[in-house]
Image (cartoon, grey):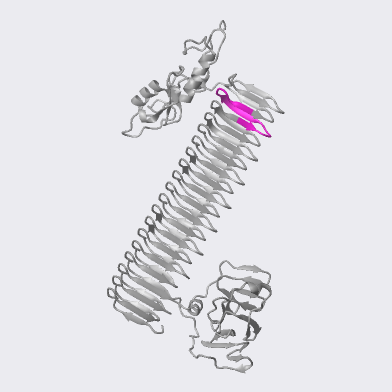
Amino acid sequence: MENRKVINGVARNEIVKHEGDLIVEGDVGECAQINLTEGALIIKGNVKEGARINLSLSEELRQSSSIKASFGSVSIGCISIRNGGSFSAGSYSYADIRINNKLAGNVNIDNRIFTDDQVEELGGGKFRITKQDSNGMFSFVSINGRKNKSPDGKIAAKIDGVNYAGKEIFVDKKEVWVDGILSTGIESKKSPSVPRETPKLLIEGNVEDVVVIASDAEIIVNGNIGKFCQISSEYDGLTAKNIDEETKIVVRNAIKVGNVSRLCNLTSHQYGLNADSLANNVNVKTRDQIEIYGDIGNNCKLVSQQYGLASLNIGAGVEITTRDEIKVKNVGDFTKLSSANYGVKGGAVGNNVHINARDQIELSSVGDNSRIESKNYGITVDADVGSHAVFIARDVISTGSVGNRANFTSQNDKIKIRGDVGQSCKLNAKDSIRARNVGASSEITSRNDEVELVNLENYVKVNARDNISIMGLCPTSCSLHSSSGKIKKFPQPKQPPQPAPSQSTPVLSEVKQTLFSPPAVTSSEKREVVIPEAFLCIITQDVMQNPSICLLDGKTYETAAITEWLTKHGTSPFNRAKMESGRSVESYLVPNRNLLDLIDEFFEEHPGLANRSTNTI
């Protein structure tokens, strides 16, 4: 390497200036400074607290030492507009814009001709350099700030390391003619004929706290980066191990790091981020893909302008905005996920989560008060959806059980609920709706198709254009209306006897009757009034006087009965879910006041049922 220098180390507060390659065998001391131009920097030790490093490269050196394939180029016929280097067959040429045999803006031909003006390729090693055409596509190329601009407004070029200026420059292999005269140029500082290796800033040790690094070259740190650092690379990227608190990284190319501590800010203007994990309050902004191999902490904000994001678990209060797909595992409370052009795939979603996507949304479960919206596709949830959830989709909505006061809308397709539907829910679809065990005061509407339901509680409203089919319970307080079809009611089919479970822990089948089994029929001498099954405790099979929801399974029981059961068995009588060690029975029970009001209203309408344990008058 030319002008190569090796030093043992940099002392505290020492300032080192050098042009060319520099190797530091030891540490860079506290508050020391290194100002390097036109070369690579290798530091074999650590960079101590408060040190400052600046590495500057000329445009010529950056381009001649880094011949890379074009990224993000746009080609239209014979027109090519580039924002990166490119190869041409048999030789190397680079330009911001190329039309046929003309190049303009940041031109580099074979690492020997450099200019910001227009170059016309004539063949046979001949080139003509003139002012840029004022019309056509070349008018889009800015000439402000040209490095080779002549002070008198003439065109300028550097050819084989020599500067030339004039109205027209003609290159004939090794000869250069300026305004028709063979010229030797203004300077005679020769560039190397063979491109050199890309300069880098390599730190083999650690970067300690409050260090400032500004580099035109790629930054590689084999160790960790400390707190409160500021790291930037205007033309390349960063590779490091772990990053400590409140460090700011701004680069052009990719960021590849390990664990990122809290309150860090990471920006890649043209590429993406690869990291092992992000702690709380980390901000990330990239153009390309964000890949987090572990978890993302609380209150992080991540933006990928052109690509997507993949991660494991996401903490609470996180905001993720992408253009492409978001793929995650579990999602914490109060998190917002948005994909402008693709979908979202996730696991368990917490409470108060907002998800907005253009394509399909696929989740394992969804908590309370969440809003899920797919603009052009559907929503699929494998398990249950909590209360007060809002789902809006263009296509099919398919879920397990749905909590109270959920609101689902399918604009152009159907709704399929595989589990139970809570109280005061609203299901609205263009096509068919299928659900079972629909809670009290719910509203089911199919605008253009049929509705098929199993077991309704009181005050359920069903509207459809085609047939309405109800199997099982359908209290007289329910409202059924079909504009063009029929209303069909079918009795609940009897279930075959179930074999006794092998487990020692009691299950629901060991109770007197199941939730959906009808109560015993009374004598024909009395007029029968069927008490809604939702009013009966699963354990006692009596009308509940003090109903409570068990958080282990979401079912409602008589408070005294479920308290006794949990105290004795420690598991749900419905699904055998276990109580957590050290947690009280009372912490699993929530009073179901809405159901108690419905029970009271029912018996007010039937004063003959003085004894709530009977079902006849």
Q: Residue at x 38, y 57 (%)?
A: 259
Q: Is residue 97 above or below residue 406?
A: below
Q: Is residue 460 magenta?
A: yes
For the magenta stretch, what is the residue range? Answer: 444-462
Residue farthest to the top, as pictured: 525
Where in the figure is residue 298, as x and y percent of width and height?
A: 41, 49
Q: Residue at x 59, y 33 (%)?
A: 427
**580 vs 460, nearest the viewer:** 460
Q: Residue at x 49, y 36 (%)?
A: 386
Residue farthest to the left, as pictured: 12
Q: Residue at x 57, y 7 (%)?
A: 524
Examine the rendering and report whether any part of residue 288 can be seen: yes
Q: Is residue 398 above or below residue 510?
A: below
**41 vs 571, nearest the viewer:** 41
Q: Is residue 196 above or below residue 377?
A: below
How many numbered marks appear?
Answer: 0
Quadrant including the N terminus: bottom left
Residue farthest to the right, as pictured: 484
Residue farthest to the front, as pictured: 152
Where in the figure is residue 82, as x and y percent of width and height?
A: 59, 71
In the image, 435: left or right of 190? Answer: right
Q: Quadrant of residue 8?
A: bottom left
In the image, 252: left or right of 230? Answer: right
Where in the figure is residue 349, as x and y percent of width and height?
A: 47, 42
Q: Is residue 425 magenta?
A: no
**243 vs 12, nearest the viewer:** 12
Examine the rendering and report whether any part of residue 499 can be seen: no
